[in-house]
Amino acid sequence: MMSDADRRKAADILVAAEKDRKQAVQLSKTWPGITMEDAYAISSEVANRKIAAGAKLIGHKVGLTSKAMQRSSQIDEPDYGHLLDSMMIADGARVAHENYCVPRVEIELAFVLGKPLRGPGVGLPDVLRATEYVVPAIEIVDARLQDPRRIFDTVADNGAAAGIVIGGRPVGPLDIDLRWVGGIMYAIPRSRRPASPPACSAIRLWAWHGSPTNSASMASRSRSAIWCSPARSRAWCMPARATHCTPISAVSAASPCNLFEIDGACT
């Protein structure tokens, strides 16, 4: 267990790494006795500093929802992070690669709640009733700590969340079978960008494993969620990723239709 002073020092390290765009040494190396409680406290400290500076909490992200990933991280529940309005990136925006340490992108589904969602005892039907709509999204992931990271490092680093791009058509949670929603990501030089996405080459297609709605329900019932505020009306919830992370070391922005520009997510 870390002292409050050490937790603040750890938060200082993460803030500095994000500001300088340079990965720092793993917190688990500097403080070998770090616990999950410490990690969530550090993540909350960083988020609270940003909120005090003017940022607004708009929701939470959920990670490590599969049992296989939990076993590999030696935990028995998902991890959680904060989503701030300062992370939102406009559809069609250009994003400078130098704004990040080691940026990667993930295809996601974002759940926008129409009603508050508060645990414990929250299940899939509760999430479906509370969700106003689901929209495709892209998350920019940027680890502020060096590899190899332990689960404590990832949690303290807010799940490496760095940016969110919302696109596509909002869909009611019961209008489609969310278990079979797929994602398409294109990586093409801008000079060869076609007029329409279907003409693109180098297509990668993945599908969700299980229902992402289950991930959203986990955000309100796990003991780790004590560090997150209850899911409010109009809040965003980003379940665990549908695909592996895609590095963008050679490009300047991210998009499911073109990795050089953010054009929004595709349905």
Image (tube, rainbow, N blue to C red):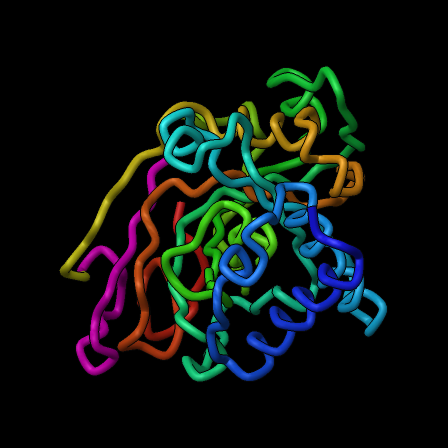
Question: Is 105 left, or right, of 145 in this rendering?
Answer: left
Question: Is 138 left, or right, of 207 in this rendering?
Answer: right
Q: Which residue is painted at 82% across and 71% down in the image?
A: 54
Residue 36 magenta-highlighted: no
Residue ranking furthest to the right: 52
Q: Please provide percent x and percent y for residue 249.
A: 30, 74
Q: Which residue is painted at 66% across and 27% down in the image?
A: 222
Q: Please provide percent x and percent y for residue 104.
A: 38, 63
Instruction: Return the residue nearer the eye: 247 or 78.
Output: 78
Above or below residue 179? Residue 10 is below
Q: Please provide percent x and percent y for residue 36.
A: 62, 41
Instruction: Return the residue nearer the eye: 170 or 22.
Output: 22
Above or below residue 31? Residue 75 is above
Instruction: Return the residue nearer the eye: 171 or 89.
Output: 89
**Where, by quadrant of the figure, is residue 130 drawn?**
top right
User: How many numbered marks does the figure carry?
Assistant: 0
Instruction: Return the residue nearer the eye: 159 or 98.
Output: 159
Position of the C terminus by quadrant: top left
Residue 181 magenta-highlighted: yes
**Where, by quadrant of the figure, is residue 132 drawn?**
top right
Question: Is 119 left, or right, of 103 in this rendering?
Answer: right
Q: Which residue is painted at 21% across and 50% down in the image?
A: 204
Q: Which residue is painted at 51% across and 47% down in the image?
A: 169
Above or below residue 138? Residue 37 is above
Extent of the magenta region = 180-199
Q: Please provide percent x and percent y for residue 1.
A: 69, 46
Residue ranking furthest to the left: 201
